[in-house]
Image (cartoon, rainbow, N blue to C red):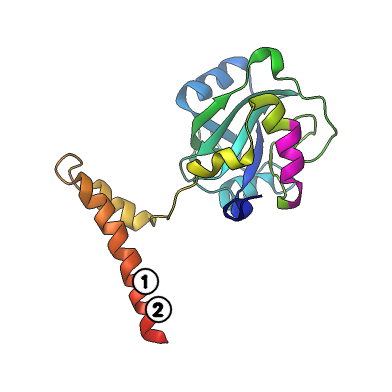
Amino acid sequence: MNARLIDLRVWKHSHGGLKDKEREKLRKRSVITLFEDTGKEQGLAFREQMQPSDFFYLCYGNRVQLFGQITSNFRKGFKRRWVERAYRIIKECSSNASKFTGPQKKWTPNFNSTCALVPTEEQSQFERQILARLFRFRLRDLEMQIPEESILPEEEDALTSLPKKKYEEGRRRLVLHKRFETVRNQERRR
């Protein structure tokens, strides 16, 4: 596996407890959700461990719907005491190939869990059983989806206040400047 993919994080997320109309509305909004106190620490994992840029696959029951990437922090949801995260779709699963028939693991569609991280040591199994079979791609294909560097929330606020058309290249310079400062400060400590 490529060294860069060691930090890859992939989640299972299920909308199994929702009604068809609710799932449809969430899909149109590109949002995944769950009850904030979902058991077995799954609600806590969704709120505190899942991060923007993490990957996930969405299922309903034993059917896989799509593979996506988280694009937001958690926020209050469409129902009282529910939380949600926005995402972007990387690939949708065709309806005729979406049924999962493999072994049960906490992160597989046929296991009764709502939100579960695929353990790093089981990512190759995830790749074979779900990603390659249902989506026709591999973990290494996701390398281009992982951001080179992260921007802190306070930096994002400053960047979004800039007029985009006039200062489009300014966004990149601000990030590169930060990288330069970090390197320079590390050299001073030596």
Residue pointed to by mark 1: 182
Is residue 7 part of the magenta span, yes or no? Answer: no
Q: Is residue 171 above or below residue 58?
A: below
Q: Nearer the viewer, residue 85 or 101?
A: 101
Whether the residues at callouts 1 and 2 have beta carbons within 8 Å, the answer is yes
* Residue at (63, 16) in percent of width and height: 94
| Magenta region, main secondary structure | helix
Residue pointed to by mark 2: 186
**Residue 67, percent across and down?**
59, 31
Name the outermost residue toward the left. 166
Residue 78 visible? The answer is no
Q: Nearer the viewer, residue 140 or 126?
A: 140
Which residues make up the magenta segment? 121-129
The secondary structure type at the circle numbered 1 is helix
Name the amino acid, label 2.
Answer: Gln
Name the amino acid, label 1.
Answer: Thr
* Residue at (57, 34) in percent of width and height: 33
**Residue 120, percent across and down?**
70, 51
Residue 179 visible? The answer is yes
How far apart marks 1 and 2 lie (CA) works out to 6 Å
Taking the image as shown, residue 185 lies to the left or right of residue 147, namely left
Q: Quadrant of residue 66?
A: top right
The secondary structure type at the circle numbered 2 is helix
Name the outermost residue toward the front. 2
